Image (cartoon, coloured by chain):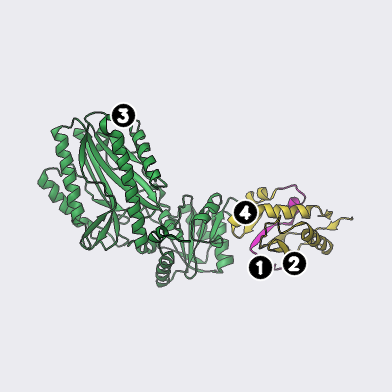
Amino acid sequence: MANMVYLGPEWSEEAKKRLEKELTPENMHHVTSSMSNIYQNTPDGKEKYLFIAFDDGKVSQFEVGEGEPPKAEFKIIAEYETFAKISRGELGAVRALTSRKLTLRGNMAKAMRLAPRVDRMNKVLATIPTDY
Amino acid sequence: MANESDHKYAVDVNKRIEVIQAEMKARDLDLYLGSRIRTMSFIVDAFVPWRSYLVIPADGLPTVFTFVIDATRLLSETWMDEDHVRGYFGAGGAEQIDAIQYFIDDELGIKKGRIGYETGMSTYTAEGYLTHYEYVRFAEALPDFEFVNSHDIVDGASLIKDEGTMNRFREAGRIVDEGQKAARAAVEGGGWKGMTETELGGIAALAMRRAGSVSEWNFAGLNEISSGWRTGLGACTPPTTKEFAAGEALMFDLHGMFKLALGDHSHNYLLAPATERQRWHADNFVACVQFIADNYKVGASPGGLITALGDFAEDRGCSDFILPGVEHGIGLFGDEWRVGASMDVPIPYWTDPEHGYQENEMVILAMQYAAEEDDIGFRYENPIIIKKDGCELTSKYPLAIEEIE
């Protein structure tokens, strides 16, 4: 499989497919929540978002776009390169948060409890052959 | 399912919030930012030991922000739901100031207005007023808000205790009495020989834990135990490894906690052989305490009680040894040191001597006797509930200073 452009339409389609297939309600502990990743300083200069929502552990919405993202329980804001490093496994999400490379808006206590499920999601996304 | 015990100790937090919000509206406040331990206890109704903040909007439910490591435990003990128990952490967007700024901005949608906050001074370290650094950071993060010192809103709302709160204090009183019984049993019949103040503090703590206490609350050193010359040192004696000795006075000031209500009872003994001079001091002290306990009632005032005590002690010839005070405030975990809630007082953050006690107000009847030249002193503390024609002592341990062999 050829590499896909990170956050491009093809990558987005593949990401949705893999998440729906590999994240089961059981291993997502039937979570109902949503998050928006806000990408600043992307290579084409635009601000982009990745929005994902889970309903009872199933991916119910997955969307990549520009501009204002749908309202989500958690909003995570960072430079494009920071998200890319996390996806490539070069930077841990907690390290990024504690060094202020990531900014989280939302209920931190709940976010901490959901962190393992987000890691699970990121691991799936990391399997997509990607050009950053 | 609620049982009878739950009902007995139930408090109406929604009513407390309504009272606070009504006062916020009267003062044109859009938000209240609480940071004191007493504010957390009053609204969260759970043990909140870490630095925390309570955001109360003018309408709707409050939200507490605590150190994230304790957020899950707190959630399991408070009436508040997951959306209203938040954690802060040293992470981008999640540290104290950011988390609250984003919450106000994103979730409450309040962009400007007036914020009531808590600042001032107190006699104990752990009060929890907003620090200067926190104030500056919040003011920078929320530039379109005016910050107004408003802690007296919570002070006023918490002044008169409801039935569930009084029942909690009654139970805390029963618990410290169990500690006093265990302490007495440990020292009588020569049991005091070789025993240290710290050991006695531990024996009492175990008895109180067995009786249902969850903490010996640490503002002044857990259980305060003193003996001999240390009994005359004043009103704070964390226990030491000093051993008890024949011919000394003993003072056991025991602290327990039940559903955030603080039990606090001090009891005194003389270890035989007591001298006539020691017995005279002891009898003076018992008489003075009884005199004050007999004079608490609705409409009495701190200044009036102190004046009356001074006259009483003068008549007995012991006024040189009675410290000028008869009480301090008591509240749910936290402290209500000064008596009353008014800020219109002669000396800010101290008790108003003209404060008129109201029915179901609570204070700790607290008296101190110090005769340093005789190496002896006594302390009495007992949380009391003010009643129309008197007061109710929450500790029922008999007022007396016995001589123990």
Q: Which is more foreground, mark 1 or mark 3?
A: 3
Q: Residue at x 27, y 47 (%)?
A: B381
User: How many numbered discs, if any?
Assistant: 4
User: Do labels 1 and 4 touch, CB within 8 Å?
Assistant: no
The residue at which mark 2 appears reads as A66
The Cα–Cα distance between marks 2 and 1, rounded to whole angstroms, is 14 Å
Q: Is residue A71 magenta?
A: yes
Outermost residue, left side: B315
Residue B29: name its quadrant: bottom left
Q: Which chain is green?
A: B
Look at label 1 and name its amino acid: Lys
Outermost residue, top side: B194
The Cα–Cα distance between marks 1 and 3, rounded to whole angstroms, is 66 Å
The residue at which mark 3 appears reads as B243
Look at label 4 and name its amino acid: Arg
Q: Colour of chain A?
A: yellow
Picture disc at residue A16: none
Q: Nearer the viewer, residue B396 or A64?
A: B396
Of the numbered discs 2 and 4, the one sitting upstream in the chain is 2
Instruction: Estimate how packed mark 2 is, as few (under 14), some (14 to 19) or many (20 or more) residues with alpha carbons within 10 Å.
Output: few
The segment highlighted magenta reads: A62-91
The residue at which mark 1 appears reads as A71
Residue B237: name its quadrant: top left
Instruction: Estimate how packed mark 3 is, as few (under 14), some (14 to 19) or many (20 or more) residues with alpha carbons within 10 Å.
Output: some
Tell me, yes or no, whether dots 2 and 1 are on the same chain.
Answer: yes
* Chain for disc number 1: A
The Cα–Cα distance between marks 3 and 2, rounded to whole angstroms, is 75 Å
Residue B118 shows in this picture: no
Look at label 3 and name its amino acid: Glu
